[in-house]
Amino acid sequence: MMNDIKKVSVSKEKIEEILTRLGKEITKDYQGREPLFIGLLKGCNPFMVDLLKHIDLYCSLDYMDVSSYAGIKSTGNVRINHDLNTNVEGKDIIVVDDILDTGRTLSAVVSLLKARGAKTVKLCVLLNKPEGRVAAIEADYVGDLVPNEFVVGYGLDYNEKYRNLPFIGVLKEEVYSK
């Protein structure tokens, strides 16, 4: 698996710094409130689990399985594979995802949650790739910026592989151009 990685983009140590910083920001911003964290499966898992350990608030969790990717490309179609079990009406929502790339998925999710009556909707992403953006959306909480390269690890995948890497790495092009 390591032979498929061209370079480490965000180290394990840098991820820990990001988690601490974002946890403090969210804790400060949501004092006196009980946000509902909605993770977008599957990529959010490591990030969301570790982020919540740094948040000193009462909160609740739910997940959506939403996809718009096939291989390394966005299909342009956002599909809900599994919807929420929680009523979001009147709630302060923080949507957690691994990466904000094209913005299509997060834009669709934000619109859906607002249509369902969420009081507020904020976005928290581990990575922001502004060069890939096609939808007009920005995250409220951002871990780190990454260039327009295909990254994997710490939840991010290529065809369901590499999610278990403890860092974010750039995948060698020959791996996905076969």
Image: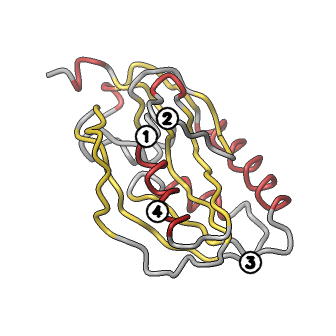
Quarter of the image with the C terminus is top left
Residue labelled with disc 3:
58
Q: Mark 1: give few (<14), some (14-19) or many (20+) Cα within 10 Å.
A: many
Q: Residue at x 55, y 56 (%)?
A: 96
Labels 4 and 2 touching (C-beta < 8 A): no
Labels 3 and 2 touching (C-beta < 8 A): no
Q: CA distance from mark 4 to mark 2?
A: 29 Å
Residue labelled with disc 4:
112
Residue labelled with disc 1:
153
Amino acid at dot 1: Gly
Q: CA distance from mark 1 to mark 2?
A: 5 Å
Q: Which one is earlier in the sequence, the residue at label 1 or at label 3?
A: 3
Quarter of the image with the N terminus is top left
Horizontal relation, residue 82 to residue 39: left or right: left
Q: CA distance from mark 3 to mark 2?
A: 30 Å
Question: Relative to 8, is 84 above or below?
Answer: below
Instruction: Write down the quadrant of residue 172 in the picture.
Output: top left
Q: Residue at x 48, y 54 (%)?
A: 44
Instruction: Return the residue nearer the eye: 115 or 65.
Output: 115
Instruction: Identify the element where label 2 is drawn.
Output: strand
Q: Nearer the viewer, mark 4 or mark 3?
A: 4
Amino acid at dot 4: Leu
Amino acid at dot 2: Ile
Horizontal relation, residue 105 to residue 51: left or right: left
Q: Nearer the viewer, mark 4 or mark 2?
A: 4
Q: Which one is earlier in the sequence, the residue at label 3 or at label 2?
A: 3
Instruction: Identify the element where label 1 is drawn.
Output: loop
Q: Nearer the viewer, mark 1 or mark 3?
A: 3
Question: Relative to 88, is 95 above or below?
Answer: above
Can you give x and y, in whole percent of width and height, for residue 162 in the image?
34, 41
